[in-house]
Amino acid sequence: MSESTNGTKAAPSRRALLGWGGAGLALGAVAAGGTAAALRTGSSDAQPAAAAGEAVPFHGPHQAGIATAVQDRLHFAAFDVTTTDRAALVKLLKEWTAAAAAMTAGHEVGDGAYGGLPEAPPDDTGEALGLKPSRLTLTFGVGPGLFEKDGKDRFGLKDRRPAALIDLPAFPGDKLDPARSGGDLCVQACADDPQVAVHAIRNLARIGMGKVAIRWSQLGFGKTSSTTPDAQTPRNMMGFKDGTRNIAGTDTAALDKHVWVGEKDGPAWLAGGSYLVARRIRMHIETWDRTSLKEQEDVFGRDKAQGAPVGKQREHDEPDLKAMKDDAHVRLAHPDSNGGIRILRRGYSFTDGTDGLGRLDAGLFFIAYQRDVRNGFVPLQQKLARNDALNEYIQHVGSAVFAVPPGVRDKDDWWGRALFA
Amino acid sequence: MSESTNGTKAAPSRRALLGWGGAGLALGAVAAGGTAAALRTGSSDAQPAAAAGEAVPFHGPHQAGIATAVQDRLHFAAFDVTTTDRAALVKLLKEWTAAAAAMTAGHEVGDGAYGGLPEAPPDDTGEALGLKPSRLTLTFGVGPGLFEKDGKDRFGLKDRRPAALIDLPAFPGDKLDPARSGGDLCVQACADDPQVAVHAIRNLARIGMGKVAIRWSQLGFGKTSSTTPDAQTPRNMMGFKDGTRNIAGTDTAALDKHVWVGEKDGPAWLAGGSYLVARRIRMHIETWDRTSLKEQEDVFGRDKAQGAPVGKQREHDEPDLKAMKDDAHVRLAHPDSNGGIRILRRGYSFTDGTDGLGRLDAGLFFIAYQRDVRNGFVPLQQKLARNDALNEYIQHVGSAVFAVPPGVRDKDDWWGRALFA
């Protein structure tokens, strides 16, 4: 997981594109002109690979940030909707979409008000000025509370709630903090430069002031998953490669089978979308670090050095599940032990200082995408939560689930349009 | 502040250097062999520049991580010493030094126990395996509490406390959280890859178990300062370039005058060292974002786009202080307004989620090095805390001061040797 951005590459900087300091440039023009060349016109599900530092196309049949090659850094935010006005919420989602299209293309939000309207607050907070697009993706989701909360149909959407958007069941060992769980909306910002990811969430929060409020947010400093089949899996905070056999972003058959909501799955507004499960998994780092190498390797079912399954030589060798202990993590999580269940993992390591007892508050911010959580994360976690040897060293302390709409097709489309149609 | 590491560069990975998975390699051999070529032999104070991804030399007359070109990421930890045994503390500092020499050179901690002693916990936690050295620097300091705490001379060091290692006075507007302030020891880990910086602090904490405990730690995701004179100053979370006129790491005259403790300054054990002030500065992001561009620029005394001083065109143009408002930040902080006081700044932006009220817990983790805090940070902050227009938008919520010993000269030297001699 070394930095992959090539600092010497002549990618256009934000300032160069915006003509910063000169005449203002209308957002419409930016979105239409700046990203037009990058618009996806083909029907392939596979995301085109963006070079390091470059822009990932925002428009397409699926949202970017799912099958997209995993970027180095994360800022994830869950929002509570505070307005009760459906029209205000719709207006915000349109504004958010325009801002997201601009920011992922490497532009600032807004119409150049820095130079034109000094008596107004700037349209963009400015801390990403001069930085590259950095493969920023912004992925938008809607939580159960948008459809119904405390028995109320808040926005006339109750009948549109997907059957698969369940409230996650309680799992054995969960110790969930409500302040780090749930949310009516979410935005996952991934980028190779953390300042670009932080900037994006902050500007969306600023635009949403008075209509939404951040419920919780999480920075991830290092990716733990790869959706690029030829890449090595990055190591997690336990020093292991986990999630080796992830779904590749180029494997359209697997994406269609396990990740994208199909036309027949329903509801229609979600076709081409997915479901996101986020879990903040605290690791008992200090306990793990006092555990023998043998115990660590038995717990995972891999060797620590290479990441090879028990008895094998290389990370990507086919695992012999029966050679592992019954409660080994790899054995329990393997599709062969779960009727073929596969999920697309996109987790990040986090370290949020210390916990007041001298222990690092560190672990894995687990993110998984799937076609149906009832056939994805839920049965997998029900098995793992009961049996996984890893449970001695981890605890789930935050949880959220979101339905992730399909991609924004073009500049007239917006996040949630089909839902609110 | 875009990512500067060139991912395509053929820097040796940790695994290649260690011969990982094969026979163990003694730490002594690693330290002596692996870093010998990189040892500094000259007497120049200037740090040789490390290429992106490469190792920064650990040994030298000054500790690395001060004049060193600023890396992209930070993990800073303050420790309480929990042992009362001076010999145990000395032993730990020797172990820490050996581990720091290995990790900054891009090696793992220890003697290859992964392969040799499966029944023991690994000597290294492993999550940086395969990553590049990433310009990791580890900078060690000692706080006031090491010399005296609650009236007790804990380790026979009371008479060795430098006169300049004062307890910082209370400044107007401070709202310090004791849980984020102070500490008997500190280690500043800077690297271009955050996983490398996090790994380093975590392994030092692990090695220190039972003798020291982390009191607080702080991740910084983006540098806000530059010690490289030809580089643009990165933007802080307010979107501004601040600290433009920082001391350059190559300006040996300025370093000798303002940063390094001189032979005659005393005490002798600190000659070639420095003093570190760390302040966690929370920014009232949401208030700032609703402020007009004109107000923002008046507060700083710069324009936001270019970072140019009031009435000037470019960031590095000589400022006309009298053209600024009386309470402009640049005007108040400028050496000409402070009898020539200069400090070397090495701060990082942080975002630690939200504060429970829907506001981002974000700001600047300020780090400054100086020859004497009584002629450096203290008078500067006394002036700023009373007068700076910026105070409406910020609050100091954490504070610590440390004496930073001189560099580790060679493999027989260790952090604090002269202090404990």
Image (tube, coloured by chain):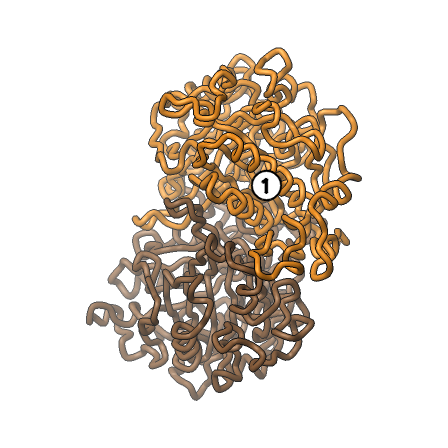
Chain colours: A orange, B brown
Q: Quadrant of the N terminus of chain B?
A: bottom right
The residue identified by callout 1 is A190
Given residues A25 and A106, the one toward you in this image is: A25
Chain letter for mark 1, please.
A
Which residue is pictured at 35% across the width and 79% down the height? B162
Please state if B170 lies on the left or on the right of B97 as rendered.
left
Answer above or below: position of B149 versus A279: below
Numbered marks: total: 1
Answer above or below: position of B390 versus B6: below
Say if residue A122 shows up in the picture: yes
x and y percentages locating residue B138 in the rendered image: 49, 62
Say if residue A322 shows up in the picture: no
Given residues B291 and A48, the one toward you in this image is: B291
Please state if A318 lies on the left or on the right of A280 as rendered.
right
x and y percentages locating residue A334 in the rendered image: 53, 21
Given residues A81 and A136, the one toward you in this image is: A81
Dividing the picture into quadrants, the one containing residue A38 is top right
Which residue is pictured at 64% across the width and 55% down the height? A113
Residue occupying the far bottom of the picture: B264
Given residues B120 and B316, the one toward you in this image is: B316
- Residue type, mark 1 in image: Cys
Please state if B168 lies on the left or on the right of B255 as rendered.
left
Disc 1 residue crowd, few under 14, some 14–19, many 20+, Cα 10 Å: many
